[in-house]
Image (cartoon, coloured by chain):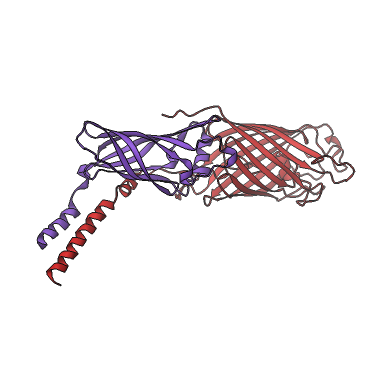
Amino acid sequence: MNNSTSKYIFTFTFFFVTFLGFSQDLLSKLDKEYPEEPVYEIATFKTTRIGLGHSIEVRKKGALEISLFNRFWNLEEKTKKRFIADEVNLRFGLNYAITDNFTVGGGYSNFDKISDGFIKYKLLKQQKNASKAPVSIVLFQAISHRNKTEYENNLYAPDDIVNSEVYSYASQILIAKKFSPNFSAQLSPTYINHSKPFLNDQPLSQFAIGLGARYKVNGHISLVSEYYYNTNPVKSVSTYDPFMFGINWELSHLLLQFQFTNTRHLAESAFITQTQNKFNFEDGNFHFGFNAIFVLHTNKNKLK
Amino acid sequence: MNKLYIYLLFSSLFVNDTDNQFIARQGQISFFSYTSVENIEAKNNQVLSILDVEKNEIAISMLMRAFTFKKDLMYEHFNESYIESDVFPKATFKGKIIEFEKNKKSQIKIIKGEITIHGISKEIDIKTTIDKTKNGYIIEGEVDLVVKDFNIKIPPILSKNIAKVVSVKFNFQYYPYE
């Protein structure tokens, strides 16, 4: 190696090292400055319901959700046909977030005449890249009241059911995980208790397990599906497990959830245990509708 | 001659950059989107920035999740639907201050550099006011960014709610780097 080549190598190394020093750059220096704070997952489902049942989402303090749910279906008999659909069940509901983790709400469904109220508490928030909190957990308790049951004229209903009032309680532990920015899933063990039997051989305590998932298609559209497995359904009338497939469309303050399902009920205790239709596309069984949810922020953050 | 090179080589390795460097750990960046339908405003108070007064270099880095909004649902939409902070958690800038004079009390200069938002990099020039303080500097200014440039998709139905050009304000207070 002669003198000039070694000079050349030195010059090259010199500039290379200074260049490295230059780009051992200020940005990577800044990366080390970030404080180590837990980052919580957001938008696991984005909407407070997956579709039928509640999701682990709760709104932040002061948010008021005004919601209108509807389900349309045709009667099995072809005798009367109306425009779009023969029957509809509407539920008008309000939810209010008292704190960031605690929400109360309620609603009334006009077809099955069920009033329902619920409390929802977020127990655990899933953290990003941390083994400490790999899932989100929400405790959910609902109470529903049915003034006149649709079983009044049912051959199988006990005699004393007429004009009696039934209270049903639904308790759920909602466990959800956001697996990737696009995919989240939820498991919802459910316990439902009825204050009195309204069908023959009606079990007062019923158990179910819910499965739900969301797949984000793009920024504003996601596909959702939900299914509840009943472990001890009513035997005297045939009931089926509720299933739902839908599309969620998130538009600023308005969240829309379009869905196809086999249940016409909108309160937890009713749609989980009292769905009397199979999931298929025949008249009478096929239900469609949407949940329209408007979010009003009664409490605006101050930007310091 | 070789000795000189070796000296240069080692000096460049061991020279302490940090004497000429200043850091801002609580820099502020806010952005505004004004339309006839809706005004959206957000602020980030935890922006990191570093200033090298010898090389006239500046770098800025921030977490998109650290922006706060007046309405909480906006925060969720911003992170999940528009900026996709799960995939692109940071926005960064690195650039050079043109003709920076490190001892001048107050000066208005152009910073030329590359901004990266939503995984898209773009060359920009920013006009800034630089003031020298007792033990550091304050840099502030304003820049307009075109939302479309950063591949941020706004559905047609919401195009009236979000401004096409978002104005971004910044303010950094630098202290000696330790």
Q: What quarter of the picture does the N terminus of chain A occupy?
A: bottom left
Q: Is residue B98 left or right of residue B15?
A: right
Q: Name the one closer to the observer, A232 or A150.
A: A150
Which chain corresponds to the colour red?
A
Side of A138 relative to A199 (left or right): left
Q: Nearer the viewer, residue A19 or A111?
A: A19
| Relative horizontal placement of residue A43, taking residue A66 as reference (left or right) | left
Going by the picture, which residue comes out furthest to the right? A79
Quadrant for the C terminus of chain A in the image:
top left
Compared with residue B144, is residue A208 higher up or lower down, i.e. above or below?
below
Answer whether residue B60 is visible to the viewer in this image.
yes
Judge left or right: residue B165 versus residue B112. right
Residue A229 placement (x, y as % from top left): 69, 51
Residue A285, given in percent of the width and then of the height, sits at 79, 48
Determine the residue positioned at 11% across, 63% down: B2
The colour applied to the residues of chain B in this rendering is: purple
Q: Position of residue A105 (x, y in %)?
A: 63, 32
Q: Which residue is depicted at the point 41% across and 45% down?
A: B90
Asked if one can make out residue A47 in the rendered structure from this viewpoint, the answer is no
| Residue sitting nearer the eye, B170 or A158 | B170
Position above or below: B119 against B45: below
Whole-percent x, y for residue A91 in the image: 71, 34
